[in-house]
Each structure stands twice: as structure tokens, then as C-alpha cells.
Amino acid sequence: METRYLGRTGLKVSELCLGTMIFGREVDEAASFGIMDRFVAAGGNFVDTSNTYSQGMSETIVGRWLQGQARDQIVLATKGSFSVGEGPNQIGASRKHLLHAVEDSLRRLNTDYIDLYQIHCWDPGTSLEETLSTLNQLVLQGKVRYIGASNFKGYQLQKAVDVSRANGWEVMSSLQPLYNLLERTIEWELVEVCRNEGLGIIPWSPLRGGWLTGRYRRGMEPPQDDSRVGRATLKNLPVSWDNYGNERTWQVIETLVEIAEQLGKTPAAVALNWVKDRPGVTAPIIGARNMAQLEGNLASVGWSLDETSRQCLDEVSAVAAPYPYGFIESTRGDR
């Protein structure tokens, strides 16, 4: 596995990031250790978690595993701001909550510092100055090395960069957004902000909860099993059949499967390879419930899509841009 710089920083991370959201919930500690060991053996050094994953158990498991590793060889990322308990100050990006959340994460992770600390979601109730000055304080204290964001709008991310620079504070180094062949709307603004300002993009859900593995095909009945799509369909969650079982999805999947067959790869490997090499992307976040899924994800590195295949995937997954994005794009020939 190759390494890449995280945006314009000097921090080198593996071209795949291992996500640990299901550790402690769907994957027990022993299996989690095995998955992390295999990821590192394959050349991975970038591990992402959050204080809310499995109610803190994900961080705890990662922390226990970390005790058997060379700490300086692992780039450890976690997140804060979502609710972690009862009470009005157990959520958000306020100074009170973030300082408490970081200390709790450090304790669970069994480490003195976090390589990349990310605000999990925009907090409309806290001023950016309060959030960003707090993150800067954590960097100056050595408890956090780099800072980033997840689930921000374009103007919010740009404002965060501008406010930090204006005050001489640490500037965000990364964005963790939803990005895959079925979800490309970050290209309208967020990708441009990241590329212009030097933030690395770390896409979450690059296989969109299993939709891009080739498991689901046109004409199938909605799954009722224990798969992520099956559970989401029963509970009407974002990756449910109702949300994705449509003509555009089937066209994307059919093209993906056809290209995978031509290349002798799996659809998942092709979908991951596509997003891994998109402009501005540093490392997509892969997840695995077992070793077989991990090996399938690791098969996405060490090769590149040919231009014809890439163009086919670009075209079939393209989404018509709303105003003003489409209008501005259409005027380029007039300039």
C-alpha cells in the first residue's frame, strides 16, 4: 500500500484508511485486533474512529490494540461533537464539550496524543471562533497533532479555514465527507474548497453501505437479512432500498459490474479504486466485518483504472448540477 500526504501537511498516511465504526458492535475485540493487524501488515497506517462509535467501545478496542503497536507508526484519527451522554453539554463543538471529549478519547485510546482530531458535524449552536480556538489550544498543548472536519457544507468549511488563518490558529487539514459512485454532490463545492485550501479528503462510505459491492441487482426483492442494506431497509435508514433501489443506482451498478468483469476485479475493488484516485482524495475509509471483507477492500490498491473504464464510471454516475453550478459550468465556453 502506498502512502500519500494528508492535504498540504507533511503527514503521510496510507492510501486506504481503516474505519472502526462497527468494532465493539458487530465485530468483537479479537476479530477487531485481527483486522487491524492485517491492515497494518498490508502497509496501512491510518486508522479512524470516533468517541460515539459503539458508545466508546470502538475507541477502547483500538486503544487496547495500540498498546501492542509502535505508536509513532500509526496515524490515529478520531472525532468528537456528537452526543456521548445525558445533559446539555454532552453534545456539540463548545469549548466545554470538546475539552472533555478529547480527554475521554485519550483515556479510551490509551495514548498521549491524537494524530487527527475531527469535528464530527457542524454545530450551529457554537461560534466557529469558540470551536477553532479550542482546537488550536489542543494542538498547542500537544494533545492533538492535526485537526479536521466531517459533515460540513462548503461555505462552513471555507469559513472555518478563513477564521483560523485570520487569527493565526491551526488550520484544518482534512475533510471527511460522504463520497462514492452513488453520492457525488461534494464535487459541487467541497472538493473545490479542499483542493484550493489544501485539505485532504477522507471519504466515508465509499461502497455506500454495500450497494457498490455487486451484491444487489435490478429486479431483486429488498433484502430482509442482517446486511447493512437489509437492516436499513427495515428501519428506513439512509442506505435503505427505498432510497437507492432506483434506475440511476441500477445503471451505475450494471456498469460497475461490467467493468469489474472485464478487469478481472470485484465490483467493490473497482468502486474503491475509482474513489481512491478522485481529485483531492487522500484515502477512502474502508470498513470490514470480517477478514474476507477486508481482503476484498485491500484488493483495490496496487493498480489503476484505465482511462476508458474511469470515463464510463464518471459518466454513468454523474449527477446533473443544480443552479448555479450547472449554469456557471455552461458559461465556460463563453469566456
Image (spheres, rainbow, N blue to C red):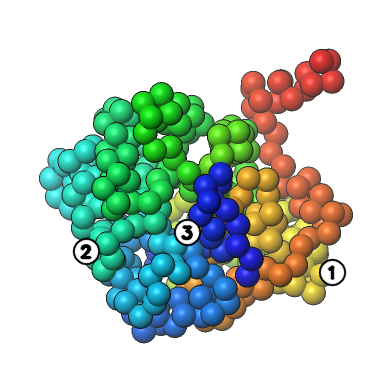
Pick the quarter of the image with the N terminus. bottom right
Determine the residue positioned at 64% across, 61% down. 272
Cα separation between marks 3 and 1: 31 Å
Image coords of residue 281 (percent x, y): 61, 50
Tag 3 residue: 233
Secondary structure at badge 1 equals: helix
Cα separation between marks 2 and 3: 36 Å
Image coords of residue 28 (percent x, y): 35, 79
Name the foreground residue: 206 vs 164: 164
Q: Is residue 61 left or right of residue 185?
A: left
Image coords of residue 192 (percent x, y): 61, 34
Secondary structure at badge 3 equals: helix
Answer yes or no: is residue 193 visible: yes
Residue 94, quarter of picture: top left
Pointer 2 or 3: first along the chain: 2
CA neighbours of label 2 inside 10 A, class few (<14), some (14 to 19), many (20+): some
Dot 2 and dot 3 residues touching (CB under 8 Å): no
Pick the quarter of the image with the C terminus. top right
Name the amino acid, label 3.
Answer: Thr
Residue projecting furthest to the left: 87
Name the amino acid, label 2.
Answer: Arg
Tag 1 residue: 262
Answer yes or no: is residue 242 visible: no
Cα separation between marks 2 and 1: 49 Å
Tag 2 residue: 107
